[in-house]
Image: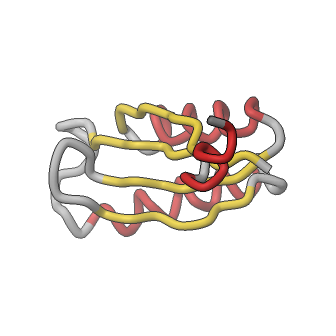
């Protein structure tokens, strides 16, 4: 199963009060679970820097990851960037 990283930045108009992030995050999570039940969500992290959120997901089907990123973009009011992540050991073994 492939691992993907979805990096997200909140749009400036995504919320008026930072406490609204809880509701926004719950809505996005519920929609992804409903529409993409086979996508394995490994974790989400709030970060300080260029991106606000880093999500780690696993799937054998890249289209599920693409759909999750689109849900985050549209429904979550975020700009996203998605990357395929190869475990370091696997990368070194292939050299």
Q: Decide which of 58, 22 is in the foreground and name it.
A: 58
Residue in the image at 19% along x and 42% along y:
50
| Left or right: residue 35 compared with residue 19 | right
Residue in the image at 83% along x and 54% along y:
38
Quadrant in which the C terminus is drawn: top right
Residue in the image at 74% along x and 33% along y:
62
| Left or right: residue 87 compared with residue 6 | right
Q: Position of residue 21 (x, y in %)?
A: 31, 62
Does residue 89 lie above or below 22 as drawn?
above
Q: Position of residue 32 (x, y in %)?
A: 66, 51
Q: Position of residue 53 (x, y in %)?
A: 35, 54
| Left or right: residue 46 compared with residue 12 | right
Query: Image quadrant of residue 47?
Result: bottom left
Q: Position of residue 94 (x, y in %)?
A: 68, 38
Q: Decide which of 49, 64 is in the foreground and name it.
A: 49
Query: Image quadrant of residue 69?
Result: top right
Residue in the image at 48% along x and 43% along y:
6
Coloration of the structure image: secondary structure
Does residue 95 lie above or below 28 as drawn?
above
What count of labels does the image hold? 0
Does residue 39 lie above or below 42 as drawn?
above
| Left or right: residue 87 compared with residue 19 | right
Q: Decide which of 34, 55 is in the foreground and name it.
A: 55
């Amino acid at each position: 199963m492939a691992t993907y990283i979805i990096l997200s930045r909140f749009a400036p108009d995504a919320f008026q009060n930072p406490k609204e992030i809880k509701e926004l995050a719950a809505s996005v999570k519920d929609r992804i679970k409903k529409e993409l039940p086979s996508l394995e969500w490994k974790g989400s992290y709030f970060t300080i820097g260029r991106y606000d959120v880093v999500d780690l997901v696993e799937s054998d089907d890249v289209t599920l990851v693409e759909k999750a990123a689109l849900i985050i973009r549209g429904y979550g009011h975020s700009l996203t960037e998605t990357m395929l992540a190869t475990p370091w050991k696997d990368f070194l073994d292939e050299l």
